[in-house]
Image (cartoon, rainbow, N blue to C red):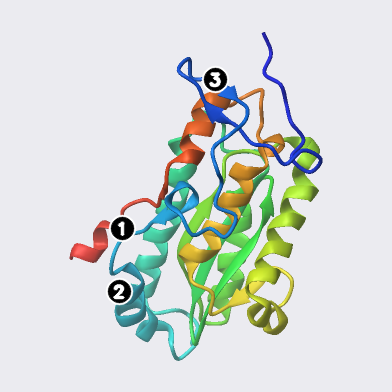
Amino acid sequence: MGIEKIDVFKDPAHFAINEDGKPVRPAFEWCGDLSCDTTGIQSIPGWDDWKTERIHPLLSDGLYPIHQKAAFWQLKASRRMDQYVTSDVVAEVGHRLYVMEYRGPGQYVKVGRAENYRKRKQRHTTEANRHGWALTDGWVSPRLNPDKLRIAERAALEEMQRRFPAAARDSGRERFYEVPFDEAVKVVWHLYCRHWTWWLWEEVVPAATAQRCRAPLLLLPRNEVAH
């Protein structure tokens, strides 16, 4: 039996998981204001302070080439972002939503969609480095349904602009200054989980993805904080 696909843009109902591990309706209560654990993020305590205290001073002058230590942390951030994909069951190439954080004389997050996120990450990072900024964090979603690519990207950007109007007004369409990385991921992940017509149904297990969406999103450990 196939699983009923609900267009959440027309039907706001969501689903829960029954004892057989299958999506069912009606669903549990979603946190529309992102305030509860079901769509929250469990980040690593102290990581933002670490970036502000240890990494940001290396980039505050906005000089090119960036400091050697900043380049080291940038490589760590890039590899950490890749783990969100290499731990997945699907191929690396495929349209995904992403959130990337850059620091230099200031801080901003970049939100968007890419068919090959590695190439997009390289392009954004190369451009940022030329201006004395470095990649300090990154996250990428599971693959997207090809029929929902523009809808997903537009929804993510509009929600970011709605939640952070001052940042959007001062930054441009995809760039949001002084918005915490975890908060940006929280917005995009919530949208992905909420709109299950965005999922690539041919390559994901709906029940497993739904269960993943019900639990708090665990950002990958930043082991460097302890050192």
**Amino acid type for the residue under numbered disc 3:** Lys
In space, the residues marked 1 and 2 are separated at their CA atoms by 10 Å
Mark 2 Cα-neighbour bin, 10 Å: few <14, some 14–19, many ≥20: some
Residue visible at 48% across and 71% down in the picture: 180
Would you say 173 lies left or right of 199 here?
right
**Amino acid type for the residue under numbered disc 2:** Trp
Would you say 67 lies left or right of 204 here?
left
**Amino acid type for the residue under numbered disc 1:** Arg
Q: Are marks 1 and 2 in contact (CB under 8 Å)?
A: yes
Residue 222 image label: 1
In primary-sequence order, the first of circles 2 and 3 is 3
**Residue 90 appearing in the image:** no
- Work out whether 49 lies above or below 215: below
The N terminus lies in quadrant = top right
Residue identified by numbered label 2: 50
The C terminus lies in quadrant = bottom left
SS class, disc 2: helix
Q: Nearer the viewer, residue 45 or 146?
A: 45
**Residue 25 appearing in the image:** yes
In primary-sequence order, the first of circles 1 and 3 is 3
Identify the image quadrant of residue 55: bottom left
Residue identified by numbered label 3: 22
In space, the residues marked 1 and 3 are separated at their CA atoms by 33 Å
In space, the residues marked 2 and 3 are separated at their CA atoms by 41 Å
Mark 3 Cα-neighbour bin, 10 Å: few <14, some 14–19, many ≥20: some
Q: Nearer the viewer, residue 46 or 127?
A: 46
